[in-house]
Amino acid sequence: MNNVSPNAPELRFSKELINEQLQKMFLDPIFANSEILRKFLAFIVDMTLAGHADWLKEYTVAVNVLDKSADFKPQDNGIVRIHAGRLRRALHNYYIHNGESDRIKIFIPKGGYVPVFTDDNNQFSIQGLNADDKLLSDPSPFALKEKLKIIAVLPFQHFHNSALENSLADGLGLQLSNALMMFEKYSVAAYYTVSDLWKKNPDISKLVSIIDINYIISGNIQRMESKVRSHIQMIDCQNGIQLWSCMHESEFDFEDIFKLQDEMVELIIVKLSDSGKLISNKKTKVLASLG
């Protein structure tokens, strides 16, 4: 803990009790499986108890929690807001499940990063949350686990570095990310955020430590004259196991690369849906959106 500042807030609970509450929460699977959520919550609680709540800005969280560099620009990168939303949802779901009887409730009102400590269940359930923050109407543990899974699409590799192939690979990644968002039980990491991080450091373990991804979809594109072949795979980030892979081959229409992107995205969506390993609903809705 930091040294206590003269500006430290008056608390309904002692700092010791609040820290005990944190340690209890961190044993719950919602937090135990996410280093980022634990680090985020511990940091903002620590700063608040030390009287430095006014330091809790997007930039401060990025540098201290997400290990961003000093030249980080919040206006160009929404990664802090993404994780703050995840943390608010995690807190909400913890307190409506295993933490329902906890004496101390912690929540983070929308629009900031300063935590509030209360023992009023009604206050927790209605403040700082809107309809988009509430994950599920079904509070079963299985449904919660499914909702929290995050998928990321890595930039597709290609070998000629031509403007056409750059456009195909980038467009494919973005279109696939948008298609995956149609599956309501899963979150999709923002494609350009993932792409930017990957270009700076193409290391899956580093990427997972920043965004806490569950599944990654990656692939490569090979072009030989008028034909193009792509290999796509899906990896479970928790254990490094390849869940499935597929290949797509077709004519390369220089005049209409959108058609090729549509074919490849449809193939991946069908593969995901039929595999039963990740997605089992709304395939028809997604495919209709591609038509």
Image: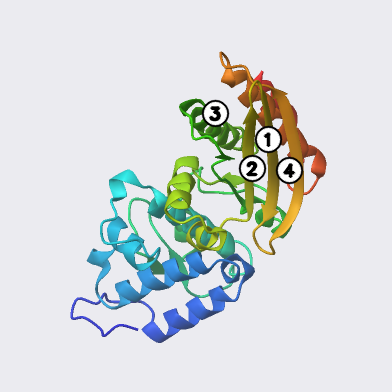
Comes first in the chain, label 2 or label 3: 3
Of the pair 108 and 270, the residue shown nearer to us: 270
Q: Secondary structure at mark 4?
A: loop
Mark in the foreground, 4 or 2 = 2
Comes first in the chain, label 2 or label 1: 2
Of the pair 56 and 16, the residue shown nearer to us: 56
Comes first in the chain, label 4 or label 3: 3
> Which amino acid type is shown beneath numbered disc 3?
Leu
- Does residue 52 appear left or right of residue 88 in this picture? left
Where residue 210 sits: x, y (%)? 47, 60
Q: How far apart are labels 2 and 1 at the CA level?
A: 7 Å
Q: Which residue is mark 1?
A: 230
Q: Residue furthest front?
A: 225
Where residue 135 sits: x, y (%)? 58, 49
Q: Which residue is mark 2?
A: 219
Q: How far apart are labels 4 and 3 at the CA level?
A: 25 Å
Comes first in the chain, label 4 or label 2: 2
Q: Residue furthest top?
A: 255
From this view, report whether residue 173 is shown above or below residue 126. Answer: above
Q: Which residue is mark 4?
A: 279
For the residues bearing labels 1 and 4, Cβ distance under 8 angstroms: no
Q: Secondary structure at mark 2?
A: strand
Q: How far apart are labels 4 and 2 at the CA level?
A: 19 Å
Comes first in the chain, label 3 or label 1: 3
For the residues bearing labels 2 and 1, Cβ distance under 8 angstroms: yes
